Image (cartoon, rainbow, N blue to C red):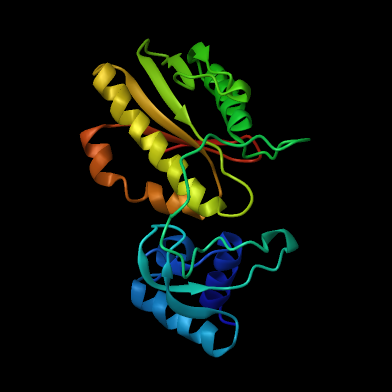
Amino acid sequence: MSGSRDRVHAELQQIAGAVCDDCLPGVATLKSRQDARRLGLELEQRGEARRLPGVCALCGRSKTVTTVQRREPEAAGDHSAIGNSGDQGETDAPEERPPGPRVWHWEGRVQTTLVAWLAQEGFGIERVADTATREAGKDIVARTPAGKPLWISVKGFPEGKNAYTQARHWFSSAVFDLILYRDENAEVDLALAFPDGFPTYRALAARLGPLRQAIPFTIYWVAESGTIRPE
């Protein structure tokens, strides 16, 4: 398998959903949608993928998509919503708390990791919402080293069936938080925080250019290792 084709196949397995030719270049480091279409067709000819009309797991639009079967047994559910009427039946519900040990990318751990990093970088931490009890309000209220207020909306990444559809709801909710925060106070610095390594969030964030010009904000990408990458 060629390097590019192998990369496309690997990213599609990680997403465990269908991806359109417009979104695939962003997650598989391709030059164009034409490359995405060509490699998708090659994978289909080799019996390693399917191309068909469906809903893209990243942008949520109905297009021609490429999908592969994820090998992990826990991914038996349908994350691509192919053949569905988009997001029908989904709600922007709060993050569910699974019993037992929580995965690294749940909202509370992303928040805790970021708060520790901010403190080390000289930010003053004024308030942290209790995500375990779904406390209302801003997730993190801090003050920059220069003394300016900073409000941050934090999201984790969902688990289980329809995780990628739910992730789009959470992403949209976080972006709407910024709009409300700016309306509440025109002087504060704003930020979003997401767990790093999830193509759904990366692809959605790449489309926020016009909004970032109108409402400047930072995105903090929080890695499993604890590394924080401001963008």
Pinpoint residue 67: horizontal percent, then vertical percent. 53, 72
Q: Residue furthest front?
A: 89
- Would you say residue 198 is visible in this rendering? no
Tell whether 226 sits left or right of 26: right
Residue placed most toward the observer, 149 or 123: 149
Q: Quadrant of the C terminus?
A: top left
Height in image: 173 above or below 14? above
Pinpoint residue 179: horizontal percent, then vertical percent. 29, 30
Image quarter for residue 137? top left
Tell whether 181 sits left or right of 4: left
Residue placed most toward the observer, 26 or 52: 52
Height in image: 6 above or below 11? below
Height in image: 67 above or below 168? below
Circle count: 0
Pinpoint residue 169: horizontal percent, then vertical percent. 44, 44
Pinpoint residue 142: horizontal percent, then vertical percent. 45, 15
Q: Which residue lies furthest to the right in this view?
A: 100
Q: Which residue is painted at 54% across and 64% down in the image? A: 17
Residue placed most toward the observer, 97 or 104: 97
Q: Quadrant of the N terminus?
A: bottom right
Q: Which residue is painted at 46% across and 70% down in the image? A: 83
Q: Which residue is painted at 32% across and 23% down in the image? A: 181
Height in image: 59 above or below 218? below
Q: Residue furthest left?
A: 214
- Would you say residue 126 is visible in this rendering? yes
